[in-house]
Image: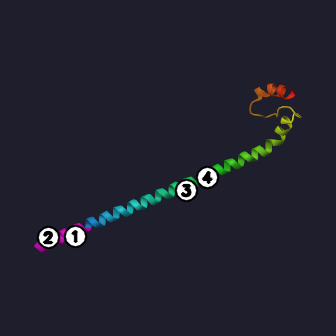
């Protein structure tokens, strides 16, 4: 009977060790998955930023000729500019 009790205690301790190892492994897996998710989100943010930056510079290149003529005083305020209400003031300043 003592032998069965000793065996029971031994198995109980072994069970606790196994459960503890399992919890540690699960925590490691969770951390690794979290790191991968963070890395994936970071890569996606970088891709989005690069895409926006590319679109911005394409827009700048598209509008440079219109603004260049205006800034050199050879043309009126470019039509389609963001703030049309400022156009007369800017045009009069450019001609002065």
Label 1 to label 3, Cα distance in Å? 43 Å
Image side of residue 93 versus residue 12, left or right: right
8 or 13, nearer to the observer: 13
Check whether the beta carbons of the residues at disc 4 and disc 2 lie within 8 A of each other: no
Q: How is the image coloured?
A: rainbow
| Residue wearing tag 2 | 5
Residue at 43% across / 58% down in the picture? Answer: 31
User: Mark 1 vs mark 3: which is more N-terminal?
Assistant: 1
| Residue wearing tag 3 | 40
Image side of residue 28 versus residue 4, left or right: right
User: Is residue 73 found inside the magenta-colored segment of the image?
Assistant: no
Q: Secondary structure at mark 2?
A: helix
User: Mark 1 vs mark 2: which is more N-terminal?
Assistant: 2
Label 2 to label 3, Cα distance in Å? 52 Å
User: Mark 4 vs mark 1: which is more N-terminal?
Assistant: 1
Give neighbour class at mark 3: few <14, some 14-19, many 20+ (Cα, 10 Å).
few
| Residue wearing tag 1 | 11
Q: Magenta-highlighted stretch: main secondary structure?
A: helix
Label 4 to label 1, Cα distance in Å? 52 Å
Check whether the beta carbons of the residues at disc 1 and disc 2 lie within 8 A of each other: no
Residue 59 falls in which quadrant of the image? top right
Quarter occupied by the C terminus: top right
As drawn, the label of residue 46 is 4
Label 1 to label 2, Cα distance in Å? 10 Å
Camera-nearest label, 4 or 2: 4
In the image, the segment drawn in magenta is 1-14
Q: Secondary structure at mark 1?
A: helix
Residue 32 percent coordinates (x, y): 46, 60
């Amino acid at each position: 009977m003592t032998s069965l009790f000793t065996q029971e205690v031994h198995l109980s301790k072994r069970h606790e060790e196994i459960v503890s190892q399992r919890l540690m492994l699960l925590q490691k897996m969770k951390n690794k998955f979290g790191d991968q998710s963070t890395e994936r989100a970071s890569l996606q943010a970088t891709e989005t930023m690069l895409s926006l930056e590319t679109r911005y510079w394409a827009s700048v290149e598209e509008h440079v000729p219109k603004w260049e003529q205006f800034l050199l005083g050879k043309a009126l305020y470019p039509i389609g500019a963001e703030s049309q209400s400022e156009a007369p003031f800017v045009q009069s300043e450019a001609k002065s």
